[in-house]
Amino acid sequence: MKQIFYSMKFIKLKLFTNKLEAERVFYSQTLGFELLDTLKDKFTVKVGGTELTFEYSDKMHSYHYCFLIPCNQLQEALIWMEERTELIDIENGRKIQRFESWNADSFYFLDASGNVAEIIVRYDLENESGLPFNISSILGVNEMGMPTSNVAQTNEKLENELQTKFWKGDMKRFGTNGNQEGIWLLPNYNIKDVWFPIQGKIIAEDFEALVENNRTIFQILFQNEQLEITKVE
């Protein structure tokens, strides 16, 4: 019997910011995500199937992450987002970037902390929607940057402990691990040292995540460039 594998998905993602109130306003008011919880030192919004938390830190952090939308709503989403925040000009007014080998298109914006955020459509998922685009059309966090000084070593740990697989790229400069519903971006920051498309410096920042892969839940702790993966019983 053929063995069936289930996609990796981000259930929770916790990032850190020194601009907590600005982030709270940006995500809950400017963009309009549902505010699930708000405390003095952190808040959580519902981003499709992902709970996205920002927690206060006294230092600046710089992340890259990506949100997934239905594959037939790129232009609709771009217009919707441009009405609420400034999109990044990639080149001479062009806002959309084509990724041929990924069969995907995306556009980018900066959040209130200056993180490089991305909206992506992945045509291979065939996840079309017949509803008008709004904030509830965003399906969840789809990519998270995990900068490393050794792509092969980080990928091997993910494969062995998270049971995900290398997806595309290479083991030296920039690799990816996971699948089209949930991907870790693994840039070697000694070689690929800036995030596209703003040339922002790639830094290995701390974060926490809860992910599901093949119907198993895992806690991810990325701290001081060290990756800890724990299966949640």
Image: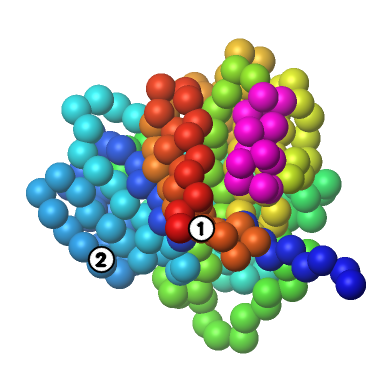
Task: Calculate the distance from the C-alpha at mark 1 to the C-alpha at mark 2.
Answer: 24 Å
| Quadrant, the N terminus | bottom right
- Regarding residue 80, the answer to whether it shows in the image is no
Q: Amino acid at mark 2?
A: Leu
Q: Amino acid at mark 1?
A: Ile
Q: Nearer the viewer, residue 175 or 131?
A: 175
Location of residue 183 in the rendering, given as x and y in whole percent from the top left corner: 63, 48
Check residue 129 for magenta coloring.
no
Res 152 → quadrant = top right
Helix, strand or loop status at disc 1: strand
Tell me which residue sits at (73%, 45%) in the image.
165
Tell me which residue sits at (67%, 24%) in the image.
153
Looking at this rendering, what residue extends furthest in the top direction? 190
Check residue 158 for magenta coloring.
yes
Range of the magenta residues? 151-164
Q: Nearer the viewer, residue 12 or 94?
A: 12
Location of residue 53 in the rendering, given as x and y in whole percent from the top left corner: 31, 52
Location of residue 90 in the rendering, given as x and y in whole percent from the top left corner: 60, 39
**Total label count?**
2
Looking at this rendering, what residue extends furthest in the front direction? 233
| Left or right: 210, with 5 as reference point | left
Where is mark 2, residue-wise? 35
Where is mark 1, residue-wise? 217
Colouring: rainbow
Looking at this rendering, what residue extends furthest in the right direction? 1
